[in-house]
């Protein structure tokens, strides 16, 4: 499993969603790395990709609603990071659709997705958790 205890930021609702995201990225990678013909793997790959396109939006929204609620000072900057990543995911999905899901591009995208997610959770989201602890805002 890709999800690790150290990814917990200590805000239960957000930790739950992060775990779901990691699970889905893992599912995506597993689908990509399966033995067999690329074309045969495509339906599952498309399905997982579609889910993630929706789920990143749902999750980022939830995180931002939470940040508003606690008066998080870096909300605007955090929002921009979310937006940039959402745009990237949507752009890739759009390009894949247009280009017929080229294997190399999809593989590269999956690697980036995982790296971004880990980095974002342990760096950017953790700052939110530090604020909560410091301010007692939970
Ligand atoms: Fe975030």
Image: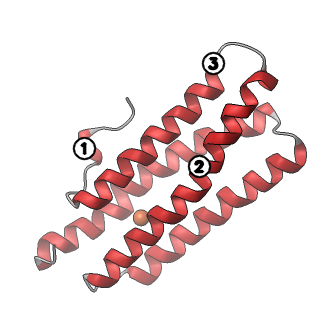
- Position above or below: 45 against 10: above
Q: Which residue is mark 3?
A: 34
Q: Earlier in the sequence, mark 2 or mark 1?
A: 1
Provide residue 7's location: percent of width, then percent of height. 29, 47
Q: Is residue 3 toward the left or the right of residue 23 in the image? A: left
User: Badge 3: few (under 14), some or many (20 or more) residues near its Cα, within 10 Å?
Assistant: few
Provide residue 125's location: percent of width, then percent of height. 34, 63
- Position above or below: 39 against 80: above
Nearer the observer, 14 or 106: 14
Q: Earlier in the sequence, mark 3 or mark 2?
A: 3
Alpha carbons under labels 2 and 1: distance apart = 25 Å
Q: Quadrant of ligand 1?
A: bottom left
Q: Could you tell me if the residues under marks 2 and 1 are in contact, i.e. CB atoms within 8 Å?
A: no
Q: Which label belongs to residue 137?
A: none
Viewer-nearest of discs 3 and 2:
2
Q: Residue sitting at 48 percent across and 76 percent down?
A: 79
Provide residue 132's location: percent of width, then percent of height. 18, 72
Q: Quadrant of the C terminus?
A: bottom left
Q: Which residue is mark 1?
A: 6
């Amino acid at each position: 499993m890709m999800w690790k205890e150290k990814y917990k930021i200590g805000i239960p609702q957000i930790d739950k969603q992060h775990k779901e995201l990691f699970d889905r990225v893992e599912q995506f990678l597993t689908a990509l790395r399966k033995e067999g013909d690329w074309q045969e793997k495509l339906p599952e790959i498309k399905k997982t990709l579609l889910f993630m396109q929706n789920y990143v939006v749902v999750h980022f929204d939830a995180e931002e609603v939470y940040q508003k609620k606690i008066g998080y000072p870096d909300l605007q900057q955090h929002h921009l990071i979310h937006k940039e990543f959402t745009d990237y995911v949507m752009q890739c999905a759009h390009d894949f659709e247009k280009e017929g899901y080229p294997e190399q591009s999809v593989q590269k995208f999956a690697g980036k997705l995982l790296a971004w997610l880990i980095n974002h959770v342990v760096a950017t989201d953790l700052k939110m958790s530090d604020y909560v602890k410091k301010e007692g805002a939970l």
